[in-house]
Image: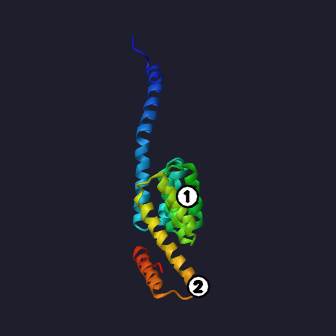
Amino acid sequence: MSPSPLRRRRLLRPWAGGVWLFAWVVCAPFAWADEQAEVRSLLARGEPAAALKRAEAGVAAQPRDAQLRFLLGVALMDLGRDDEALAHFTRMAQDYPELPDPHNNIALLHARAGRLEVARQSLETALRNDPGHRTARINLGQVHLMLAVQAFEAASADGPLDARLLRRLEAVRALLAEALPGAR
């Protein structure tokens, strides 16, 4: 005698729950990857407000998703909300101290604000975490150029620079202008 349809449904319920759980565990990372790709696409298209909204929703659903959290901070930076971005990346660096990227972006924000020594220290932290992090190394070189200009300008405040030092200052400024369009 076969079990009644009601009995069969009860027998299948534990399996159905397991199937849903399995599907969620297997498919969820792909959904999060799609969310990351969408936020990246919005940022690339120059739509930081939409990217921020999408990233905030993604982070609310997946607060431990480091990539989405990072992209949220990038959107804040692109919107010019530097104080919020700095606080966001600082929290990220505390939650994920081994990652170089939050430290790199912390450095960029400090450099934008003219806090070059703090920027240098943040980049050195990023490079301790990942010595091969090319972007952090490039940014460190740019911060060193900015520090060099700052040092030459401080020296010129004490009196006129001789021709040789003046040429060096102009050479460093030219390198900096090439590296950072819009920099002095």
164 or 90, which lies in front?
Answer: 164
42 or 10, which lies in front?
Answer: 42
**Which element type, helix, strand or loop, lies under badge 1?**
helix
The quadrant in which residue 81 appears is bottom right
Dot 1 alpha-carbon crowd within 10 angstroms: few under 14, some 14 to 19, many 20 or more = many
- Residue assigned mark 1: 89
Q: Is residue 80 above or below residue 153?
A: above
Q: Residue at x 40, y 59 (%)?
A: 134
Scheme by which the image is coloured = rainbow
- Can residue 52 be seen at all in this image of the molecule? no
The amino acid type of the residue labelled 2 equals Ala
The amino acid type of the residue labelled 1 equals Phe
Q: Residue at x 58, y 69 (%)?
A: 115
**Which element type, helix, strand or loop, lies under badge 2?**
helix
Q: Residue at x 43, y 84 (%)?
A: 167
Q: Is residue 50 above or below residue 23?
A: below
- Residue assigned mark 2: 157
Residue 157 appears at what percent x and percent y? 58, 84
Number of callouts in the render? 2
